[in-house]
Every structure is written in structure tokens, then in C-alpha cells.
Image (cartoon, grey):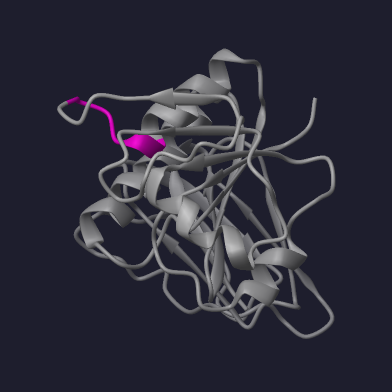
């Protein structure tokens, strides 16, 4: 099955970088305010979801799910749940970080939820790519300038980092002490990150 791309409403400044990450066979779900990105994205919606408090409901003939404005889930969360229901297992979130901090943090939590459902998920913004590290190893090429590991779920033990300027072995990162910021992949190497218990947010900075 193709990858599902959720297009959310946060600002995008580097459209060229985002467009390079898109694939011809992606399934695009535009979430309400994400429709503002249509003129500059190399994408057309396969599905539109929202309560349309941030943009007008389009009359485009594209399948559209209209949500109530008073609801527990944000448009982005509802869209992710709908895509999971439709069988997608690979996700890219764009326009999901920046702008309002509450929406950004909510979308980072959405990465946690997708990982808990056994889905692969990546959030890309103008500066970085973000994903959840849990039980499987993650490889980071030296094409990234920096990478950071942040605890956003409350538990992260048995952290190992190799191939990086600051290696770690059997380490723990707590929410109240985030010392895993701005590590560097050694030139010509690929950093490897693994975790014995818990989850961490990996931010790979271009």
C-alpha cells in the first residue's frame, strides 16, 4: 500500500525541501488549514478532512469528511485515525510543526500514537525530520548536521548510541533532564540508536 501523507496547517517555508520528500504514489490527506499549502505543494488531495474553521470547504469533487467544530480530536488526529482505519502503515506528516505550539506538541504526540499502532511515521518540517525511537534500531546518515533525542513519553532506558561524536551505552534520558540534544554523526559514519525500554523522539536536523 502507498504511503499516507497528512498535510496539516502549520507554516511551511521551504516548499522545495518538502516537495522533494513526496512520492508519485503517495496518498494525500489534506487537513483543513493544510489546504492553504495546495498552490505550492507538488500534491493534490485524495481525501480532505476538517471542520473548516481555518479554510473554506472546497467544492472540488474530492472525497471530503466534514467534522463538527466541537470535538475531542483535532482534524489531524481524526485524519490519522481514518488513515489507519483504511489500512495505511506508513505515514509522513507535513505542515505539522511550527506555528501554534499546542498543535505542534499535539502532532508530536500523534507520532507516539502511530508508533503504538505499529505504524511507521515521520514528521518533516523546514529544518528537520522527526520520528519515534523504540524497540528497533534507527540509522542516521552523516548527511544530517545534528541529531537530538528527547524524552516526551516519560520512560527511556538502555539507550545506546554509536557512530556519533557523543556515544552512549545503557543510558537513561528523563523528561526533566534532556541532555541528548545536538549530537553529531561522525564523518563518513552512520550513527546507530537503540533503546531497551521506552520511547524517544529523534530529531534529525538538516
Residue 130 as seen in the image, left or right of residue 67: right
Q: Is residue 73 magenta?
A: yes
Q: Is residue 201 visible?
A: no
Q: Is residue 97 magenta?
A: no
Q: Magenta region's main secondary structure?
A: loop
Residue 106 as seen in the image, left or right of residue 120: left
- Count of marks overlaid on the render: 0
x and y, in percent, of residue 156 in the image: 39, 45
Residue 134 sits above or below residue 1 on the image: below
Image quarter of the N terminus: top right
Residue found at x 30% / y 50%: 54
Residue 16 sits above or below residue 6 on the image: below
Residue 191 sits above or below residue 14 on the image: above
Residue 153 sits above or below residue 65 on the image: below
Q: Which residues are magenta?
A: 71-76
Q: Is residue 122 visible?
A: yes
Amino acid at each position: 500500500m502507498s504511503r499516507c501523507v497528512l498535510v496539516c496547517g502549520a507554516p511551511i517555508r521551504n516548499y522545495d525541501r518538502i516537495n522533494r520528500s513526496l512520492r508519485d504514489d503517495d496518498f494525500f490527506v489534506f487537513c483543513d488549514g493544510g489546504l492553504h499549502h495546495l498552490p505550492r505543494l507538488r500534491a493534490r488531495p485524495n481525501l480532505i478532512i476538517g471542520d473548516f474553521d481555518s479554510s473554506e470547504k472546497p467544492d472540488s469533487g474530492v472525497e471530503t469528511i466534514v467534522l463538527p467544530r466541537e470535538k475531542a480530536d483535532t482534524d489531524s488526529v481524526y485524519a490519522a485515525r481514518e488513515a489507519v482505519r483504511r489500512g495505511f502503515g506508513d505515514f509522513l506528516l507535513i505542515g505539522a510543526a511550527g506555528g501554534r505550539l499546542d498543535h505542534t506538541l499535539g502532532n508530536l504526540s500523534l507520532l507516539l500514537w502511530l508508533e503504538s499502532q505499529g505504524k511507521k511515521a515521520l514528521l518533516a518540517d523546514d529544518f528537520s525530520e522527526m520520528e519515534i525511537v523504540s524497540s528497533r534500531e534507527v540509522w542516521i546518515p552523516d548527511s544530517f548536521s545534528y541529531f537530538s533525542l528527547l524524552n516526551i513519553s516519560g520512560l527511556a532506558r538502555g539507550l545506546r548510541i554509536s557512530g556519533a561524536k557523543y556515544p552512549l551505552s545503557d543510558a537513561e534520558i528523563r523528561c526533566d533532564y534532556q541532555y541528548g540534544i545536538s549530537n553529531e554523526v561522525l564523518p563518513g559514519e552512520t550513527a546507530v540508536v537503540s533503546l531497551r525500554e521506552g520511547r524517544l523522539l529523534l530529531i534529525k536536523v538538516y
